[in-house]
Image: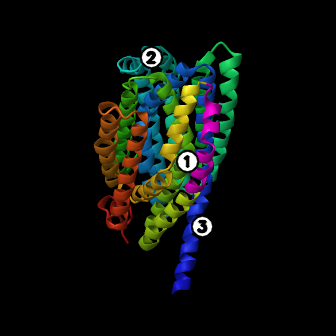
Amino acid sequence: MVFKMALQDKELLKQSWAVSWPMSLIMFFIFLIGIADVYVAGLFGKEIQAAYGLASQIYFIFSIMVFGLTVGTVSVVSRLFTSDNKEEFNRAVDSSFLIAVVLGILFSLLGIGFSKGIIYSMPVPEVLKERAVSFMRVYSFALLFSYLLINTNGILRACKMVKKSLITMAVVCVLNICLNFILAFKTPLGFTGIAVSTLVSMSVGALLNFIFVRRLMGDVFSFSFSISKRLFAVGWPAAALQVVWQIASVVLYFILSALPQNRVEVLAAFTNGLKVESAIFLPAFAFNMASAVVVGNLLGARKRHDAFHAGILTALLGVIVVTVMTLVVITNARRISSFLSQNVLVVAESTRYIIISLLFEPVMAWGVILGGALNGAGDTRGVTKITALCLWFVRIPLSYLLGIHFRLGVAAIWWSMNVSILCQSIFISRRYFSRRWIDHEVAENYVDKP
């Protein structure tokens, strides 16, 4: 019996790893793009670096809907992929892609029309606003291609074609980084070349992914309202979570802007620290997405017991990887910070942020990966509720009270973020091990009954 269980666990680990390692590389490519953006922005000065960070927050706010759509797509498509209903599977892929096109066009137009007003209404240093608007003028056009790229990546990994996504993201990474330096320093675009690089690379990536995904679609594009309702039912809580998360990030940006001194330096350090932290977070998120796919595939095949154990094994595997990476980054924190900025205060604060925040990265990884398994099962509402409560009832009020009201400084804000991560991981774990998500009503609705 024990030997049989060991063999089953080994097979589940192989399934998780088969999705996790390509996703980890994809996340690494995304990390390299972000680091290159921050590095090039830093060469133009701390104001450009801080403005880039502000524009990035707005850009991700406008990208929120595609993240929710993609979570719903992975949950639904991954089950249909392992079922016998090919016609419904084709309709699901078609419907998801068409929704991404419509949303991409809509939010590109919204970005073009409203991003300037949003930025100028924010309580951030005036010196950052016009520069951030310059970034957003270009990023708004990139939103359509970003929507298509993210959505098609979700379709590919749900269908066990994650290596196709890996090829695409390798091309996007190389193209983006090369164009960063060429457009920013060899053309009149200047620092806006950073955003133009994103626009060009995203459009190329979207085209490549469409070529890969086209074979998964029906001979004629078909839109299904019933499947779209399924995508929405699972995806809207994930989209809501992104709204809550991004608004909380912007509020945290405002809290940092209210510090009594060195505000621009702290904001630049926060931008740099987040990019470095993403070196750890993105692999954790890769395991999160891998867990969603594996659990979704197993539920689609009606292997519920295996789905439960696969989520735990994927989380343990992810924690090991994240712990090793955390140790490497912490021991090189100052060296990394010095690479991203030449300003002494920015380097010092970036180093402090990296050391404090990364101490809780393994805890973060555990919660995030188990959350991915819950998403794969369709239990997105539970994940959204827990994360939102930890953000708005722990992170934000604690950051304001300790950092601003009691004047304990920026380090207290970094520690407040850690406390919220701990709370989130505890409650996610509690929900996962209750096993209620296995019989979750939404999840059941996506599995064909025998």
Q: Are marks 2 and 3 in contact (CB under 8 Å)?
A: no
**Sequence order check: which comes first, mark 2 or mark 1?**
2
Q: Which residues are magenta?
A: 322-342
Q: Foreground: 319 or 132?
A: 319
**Sequence order check: which comes first, mark 3 or mark 1?**
3
**Front: mark 2 or 3:** 2
Give the amino acid type for the residue marked by disc 3 in the picture: Lys
Q: Which mark is residue 14?
A: 3
**Location of residue 30 in the rendering, given as x and y in whole percent from the top left corner:** 59, 40
Disc 3: CA contacts within 10 A as few (<14), some (14-19) or many (>=20): some
Q: Is residue 281 magenta?
A: no
Give the amino acid type for the residue marked by disc 2 in the picture: Lys
Which residue does the numbered mark 1 point to in the structure image?
280
Q: Foreground: 322 or 186?
A: 322
* Residue 240 seen by the camera: yes
Disc 2: CA contacts within 10 A as few (<14), some (14-19) or many (>=20): many
Q: Which residue appears farthest toward the top when viewing the image?
A: 188
**Location of residue 49 in the rendering, given as x and y in whole percent from the top left corner:** 55, 24
Q: Could you tell me how many numbered marks the image carries?
A: 3
